[in-house]
Image (cartoon, rainbow, N blue to C red):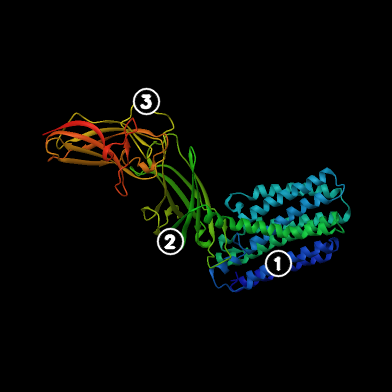
Amino acid sequence: MTDLGALTQTIPVLSVFLLTCLAGGVYLRWLMPLLNASANRLAAAMLLAQLVLVGMGFFHQSTSKFDSWLWNFDIEYNAFSTLATLQFALVGLLAILTGLIRPAAPAGRRLYFAGLGLLFLVLAYDEYHGLRSGVTGWQIPYVGLGLGVVIATALIAGRSPRDERRLYFWFLSGLALSAAGAIFLDAAPCGRGALGPWSVGVQACYEIIVPIEEILEALGIWLTLVAVLGLFSVAAPAPSGRTRGLLYALPCVCGLALIANSLAPRIESRLLAQPAHVQFKADIALRGFHFDRFADEVALRLYVSAPQAAYLGLGYSIHLVDQVTGESVASSDEWADLQHSIWLFGADYSPLYRQSMRLSVSPEAPVNRAYWIVLTLWRRNQGEFKRQKILSSDLRLLDDRQVVLQELALPALLARKSRPPASPVAAFDNGFTLESVDLPKRARVGDSMPVAVSWSSAANGDDSYIQFLHLGHEDSGEWWVYDHEPLGPRLPTRLWYTGLADSETWQAPVPADLAPGRYTAFTGLYRASDHERVTARDADGKAFLDARVPLGSLIIEN
């Protein structure tokens, strides 16, 4: 066995050089004469761009994490994967254009080019977003699609002139070369620390295989592109100025589409998301989120910046947590989506990732209760899912690994079974109505006094309010004051909603040293932030004095 050592750098470079020379020789010898001048210029431009990026990948000395990411062969969304995506998209658009401009083409041939174009546009989308990497066994449907393309192409080629059949042959050859890179080299046995007859380390094996795999795939799609350019040349051997303009516009259209797609998450995060600054370990940070509420689910979009290496293998969990009990009544777990947005202006080069999640809420979940939407980030480590530590946050934390994104109440969708009183106790100017208050006739010092209240709301809550209960001794003028949230901590008034109708029974503790006697009772609301009372009105709309609603009297006994 031979240790490859320094040859891990030489073998990929030499292999890529030979593969490029082979592809270039095929182009010069067999394909270039079949292309018109405009198509040849586009083919040469694509090959030159590919060679520049390959050279940067092999020989550029990275000075930052951004540099290292930008020129890496095996990372999505960077320069190399963007060029590969551009070539896939060009094949698709050229196929559609060829089918449209070819004069008197049979319907079957036009259908073939249209289907081929749509397929390659889908492949371009997949190439850019790396969708197949998250699907186990993706090779099987890809091989099936490839066989379908081979059969359809063979049928079309069999009814074509000789020179055109050569173009179909090189089209399929390019697909085969690309498939060899995407599928077959991907199964290289690097995990066993061996490469053919050589004994190598796992890392060294990947350093050899990955560049060859990616370049083979890129050269294959370039060869496919050149073959389609040849078919375009058959359809338009002497293209008009308008047709040439369309041909040259295609790369620009694809480039603009990629730029718009790449910038969309970052622009979206700045225009639509609620800003956040939650710093996790490994330089991962939540920059913002967008929240949507539906009848039976919650939809979230999270915007997270992170180095690509740190983001790989990350997972998200969101839970709907009862604010009183701390129990989770619904949850959703997902692996991190690798789609991100780059920003080429200013110093903020860190990729921004957009994660979409949906949380389905069971009809059995308790209603008219306050809940938190809680986010955790995790990694799988030796079979365990370890939550990531939060270093700093401008949002509320439940602990050093759980951050509260939003709070909400699950509304009761069914109307109250019992009708509200014909004449409520009081209507408040903030849209809340005190329907009834049930005080006992007598209470004993040192005991708890039950206070049953019923509330309704004709407005959405926008602040936290406290309900007060004042008892004034009719002889001495002494006052006892007790404050409580109207429906308790289970549903703060800031989460009340239009159409709310609910009740609560407090247990107000009567002080042991409270003087016995007859007391006059009053109630009302005040804003928790500044203790400003809310104006209360009777059935005729007349405001109560001092915003206090009289409730009658009761006796306090020893």
Q: Which mark is residue 49?
A: 1
- Residue beneath label 3, please? 419
Residue 348, placed above or below residue 315: below
Q: Position of residue 539 (x, y in %)?
A: 33, 30
Dot 2 amino acid type = Lys
| Label whose residue precedes the other's in the sequence (1 or 3) | 1
Q: Which mark is residue 281?
A: 2
Secondary structure found at label 1: helix
Q: Position of residue 313 (x, y in %)?
A: 50, 56
Residue that appears at 51% across and 51% down: 335
User: How many C-alpha atoms fall within 10 Å of the one at disc 2: few (<14), some, or many (≥20)?
Assistant: few
Q: Give the spatial CA distance, label 2 vs label 1.
A: 38 Å
Q: Is residue 535 left or right of residue 222?
A: left
Residue that appears at 77% across and 50% down: 96
Q: Position of residue 433 (x, y in %)?
A: 35, 34
Location of the N terminus by quadrant is bottom right
User: How many C-alpha atoms fall within 10 Å of the one at disc 1: few (<14), some, or many (≥20)?
Assistant: few
Residue that appears at 69% across and 51% down: 121
Dot 1 amino acid type = Ala
Q: Is residue 311 left or right of residue 532?
A: right
Can residue 283 be seen by looking at this rendering?
Answer: yes
Residue that appears at 77% across and 54% down: 94
Depth check, mark 1 against mark 3: the one in front is 3
Q: Which mark is residue 2?
A: none
Q: Looking at the picture, tell me which residue is in the foreground, 546 or 59.
A: 546
Q: Give the spatial CA distance, label 1 vs label 3.
A: 75 Å
Location of the C terminus by quadrant is top left
User: How many C-alpha atoms fall within 10 Å of the one at disc 3: few (<14), some, or many (≥20)?
Assistant: few
Can residue 230 be seen by looking at this rendering?
Answer: no
Secondary structure found at label 2: loop
Residue pushed farthest right?
Answer: 161
